[in-house]
Image: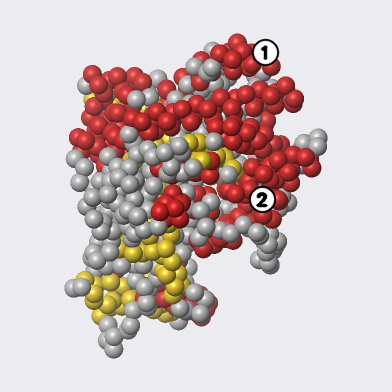
Amino acid sequence: MTRFAAPIAEAIWDMKYRFKDADDAAVDLTVEDSWRRVARALASVEKEPAAWEEKFYGALEDFRFLPAGRILAGAGTQRSVTLFNCFVMGTIPDSMGGIFDMLKEAALTMQQGGGIGYDFSTIRPRGAEVHGVAADASGPLSFMDVWDAMCRTIMSAGSRRGAMMATMRCDHPDIEAFIEAKQDAARLRMFNLSVLVTDDFMSAVKADGPWELQFDGKVWHTVQARDLWNKIMRATYDYAEPGVIFIDRINAMNNLAYCETIAATNPCGEQPLPPYGACLLGSINLARLVKDPFEPEASLDADGLDDLVRVAVRMMDNVVDASRFPLAKQAEEAANKRRIGLGVTGLADALLMVGLRYGTEKAAKQTEAWMHRIARSAYLASVDLAREKGAFPLFDADKYLASGNMKQMDADVREAVRKHGIRNALLTSIAPTGTISLYAGNVSSGIEPVFAYAYKRKVLQKDGSRTEEEVVDYAVHLWREKFGDAPLPDYFVDAQTLPPLDHVRMQASAQRWVDSSISKTINCPEDISFEDFKDVYMAAWDQGCKGCTTYRPNLVTGSVLSVSEKEEKAPEADRGAEVVYLSEPLDRPAALEGQTYKLKWPDSEHAIYITVNDIVQGGHRRPFEVFINSKNMEHYAWTVALTRMISAVFRRGGDISFVVEELKAVFDPRGGAWMNGRYVPSILAAIGGVIERHLISIGFIDGEGLGLKSDPKAQVMKVGEAPRGPACPSCGQFGMQMVEGCMTCPHCGYSKCS
């Protein structure tokens, strides 16, 4: 029986990928059972299922091939879920009926476990005339708020909450409002935002020329392109969003440019997709393919990689036939093009194991060589599938060979495609693998550098006791097995110390052989200058990337995980971070200061009284408990429950601003009410608003944007220093980090996008 590399790996398997029945009893008794279930399900569409089941099982074994989470969790369970992780939805019509038809499709897709992407550029700008109703349009951002509220109410299949990507063209009249939208920390939290940047815009930026903002042929404003670029840069410098997508480059490099136009991506950005396009993902674990790690002769097993890629392509192609789809249009789109996104994880670990420092020219060249080999093997495997099962239905040899990555592919591969066709229109993509990489033994995620070599994780046991375990990077674990406590070589580098331009170099080196795109976050130090920060994005453009996402610590999303710097020089094997899980509940003093608020809900005869009491820590007030009272007995049970639950959360410390966010997002199906000139969707939302105003009044949150001000435990701890970083909404541990475009917990694997 396979032993997990660490307790966290087993916990993630148990929580996210292990098949359990309706009563939460385990059906998969071991991880081998999970591999067998997936292998059998994907082999079921073959003419000889038994033979292929064994080959598929062999690929999954030892965590060598890692299908995306939806496949691991859903394949072979007979549940009504999709095996595709993400979708780009249909083009949004510029009409009220069409907009809400799209909202319904989004809800149905999320219900089955799919994240979604939308281009909101097709909706007329705020203030535009709405013909026939003598009114002005509210603009695309108002409808994004509706999508955001819908997403909050839907728990997707499994334990995953929906994720969304919103894009807007750089020439839309509302682009400046789009850029600034998430500077309000309570707004659009279910969305990732990215600006669709065109080639013409980048030319205008470099020339410092004018730029027209237009819709439906009408020019609304003219701005300086460089000024607009600086607004994008300043927003992402201060707030980590929006990202940048080089949309013309994406369409120019698309193998299917002859039959589709792309205007949006999946939530994490690695899959630019056409309307109703689906995102099917899987990763080759490069860290498991290195022979003789850390030895002078260390190398990647080229033949083993070749064989594994070929089996993985067949498995992923079978997913197209084995999966359910939320919408018929999604099934049709997937069947017509059969696009897959085969990528890698463990790249940084593999580079370390062959003695290369991530980010150097040598590491970039090695990465490009590995990605070229993967792309070549994948294309040849897909050609073989076309000979056996037929090419994808929209295949046109002349047009296909003249498009996208096919223009640079090896001559023998091009000839094979011309002669036999190809089964899958696009084959390679590099997805975020935060949870999957932890499950596979804490290998480095995707093509990211190692984030932290080791950190300590405090685990709350069922009996209330706490244990401490060390979570160690896979390459560091192998080093320790070979060399004991010997210091790590100086080529070990992590995300905390890697210069941002080294990140760009690695992303660009991989992009050349990636059909779709890459989900990668470029970590920037908090003290990076604004000019140097802008250089990162310009370097991404100049070096051929299809997009760029950075993360610099900020007040809205918090800080990334910090690791303790025991030495200023090369990192040592014991380098790590002390991470707080759940603090002890705060003791209640005999007397507390507080405030009582009266809330009169229009449909209730009796007022509701909300008392919030505070405790003083470090000279700052923070909320400690809440009491909710009313003479209306209809409210008694839920007000008592709410009182106890919120007070319990407050007494644990940490970032409790999410309580306000969750309450304000509750919608009453019977309708809300207008209060003080604003529409409040439910009585619970009204209570959330009262608590929010109290938190602002005591200085606990920033009234300008709900940013934490003074909570002493709302962050991950640097050893011996003040804590830093927000708390995970799943496990409660502090240290949520931005990984591949998504806030991710390194302790339990929770991610907004997986």
User: Badge 1 is on which residue?
Assistant: 419
Q: Based on the displayed image, in which of its 4 quarters is residue 193 positioned?
A: top left
Pick the quarter of the image with the N terminus: bottom right
How busy is the neighbourhood of tag 1: few (under 14 within 10 Å), some, or many (20 plus)? few
Q: Position of residue 666 (x, y in %)?
A: 48, 60
> Label 2 is placed on what type of residue?
Trp
Q: Position of residue 24 (x, y in %)?
A: 66, 66
User: Badge 2 is on which residue?
Assistant: 35
Q: Secondary structure at mark 2?
A: helix
Q: Based on the displayed image, in which of its 4 quarters is residue 518 positioned?
A: top left
> Label 1 is placed on what type of residue?
Lys
Q: Residue 69's mark?
A: none
How busy is the neighbourhood of tag 2: few (under 14 within 10 Å), some, or many (20 plus)? many
Query: Between residues 446 and 110, which one lies in front from this camera angle?
Result: 446
Q: Position of residue 269 (x, y in %)?
A: 45, 37
How many tags in the picture? 2
Q: Position of residue 668 (x, y in %)?
A: 52, 61
Q: Based on the displayed image, in which of its 4 quarters is residue 490 positioned?
A: top left
- Asked whether, in this view, residue 447 is left or right of residue 42, the answer is left
- Asked whether, in this view, residue 77 is left or right of residue 377, the answer is right
Residue 382 position (above or below residue 21): above
Residue drawn where x is 20% and y is 73% of the image: 618
Q: Is residue 170 visible?
A: no
Residue drawn where x is 43% and y is 59% of the image: 471
